[in-house]
Amino acid sequence: MVHILGINLPDNQLARFALTSIYGVGPHLSHRLCARFQIHDRCRVKDLTPFQTTALASFLQSPKTALPVPQYPLAPANFVPRPPFKSTQELQAEFNAAKTAQKQNRDEKLLQMAPEKKSRDPLTELRIESELRREIRENIAHQRMIGSYVGRRHAMHLPVRGQRTQTNAKTARKLNSLDRW
């Protein structure tokens, strides 16, 4: 049994479904986490490598301080494989010439273009477990404090999103209070 963030993940369950037992991690987010740590869709929790387990646990503990995902370069559209009859020195000289030409072109383009935004990793903004529960509790308290309709419905332990109240409001009376967790 793998223990992550105080939650036991069952061994025989698929890893991407087992991750959804963490509060705040749904199917889409668990799929993204599996892709980030190179966990196959059909991989079970018992088949995870120790590296994957520790990487997953350390990332989920502090996603903001995690290392960025490595970006591996792809072959350009005009890529031609190395011909077998050329020597290594000739190929190295051609490569260096192409590299300097590419650098000059890139520098010229950068001078012409405005600065671009860096691509952000959406997983760094991840909030799960106690942090997410605290945020929800604060939002409910804020709604009550400003006296909005939603806040008043929470304060009276009534359904918040327009459900009927003549019958079937037992769940709302149980859950819609500030002392939720």
Image (spheres, grey):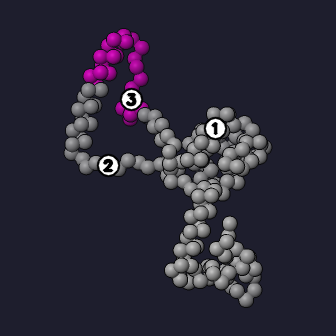
Q: Quadrant of residue 158?
A: bottom right
What residue is pinned by disc 2? 116
Q: Quadrant of the C terminus?
A: bottom right
Residue 93 on the magenta segment: yes
> What's drawn in magenta, residue-wise?
75-98
Q: Three-letter amino acid code at disc 1? A: Thr
Instruction: Return the disc, 3 or 1, that comes first in the chain's sequence.
Output: 1
102 is higher (above) or lower (below) than 119: above
Q: Three-letter amino acid code at disc 3? A: Phe
Whole-angstrom CA distance, mark 3 to mark 1, is 38 Å
What residue is pinned by disc 1? 54
> In the rendered view, does 90 fall on the left or right side of 13?
left
Say what secondary structure mark 2 lies in.
loop
Say what secondary structure mark 3 lies in.
loop
Measuring 56% from the left and 68% from the top, which residue is drawn there? 138
> In the rendered view, does 3 fall on the left or right side of 130?
right
Q: For the residues carrying marks 3 and 1, which lies nearer the camera in this image?
A: 1
Residue 22 in sight from this viewpoint: yes
Instruction: Return the disc, 2 or 1, that comes first in the chain's sequence.
Output: 1
Q: Three-letter amino acid code at disc 2? A: Glu
> In the rendered view, does 126 fall on the left or right side of 84?
right
Label 2 Cα neighbours within 10 Å, binned few <14 / some 14-19 / many ≥20: few
Say what secondary structure mark 1 lies in.
helix
What residue is pinned by disc 3? 79
Depth check, front residue: 14 or 23: 23
Whole-angstrom CA distance, mark 2 to mark 3, is 26 Å
Measuring 42% from the left and 14% from the top, which residue is drawn there? 84
Measuring 52% from the left and 50% from the top, which residue is drawn there? 123
Instruction: Return the disc, 2 or 3, that comes first in the chain's sequence.
Output: 3
Residue 35 in sight from this viewpoint: no
Kindly identify which numbered label has been placed on residue 115. none
Task: Tell me residue 5's x, y (percent).
Answer: 67, 48
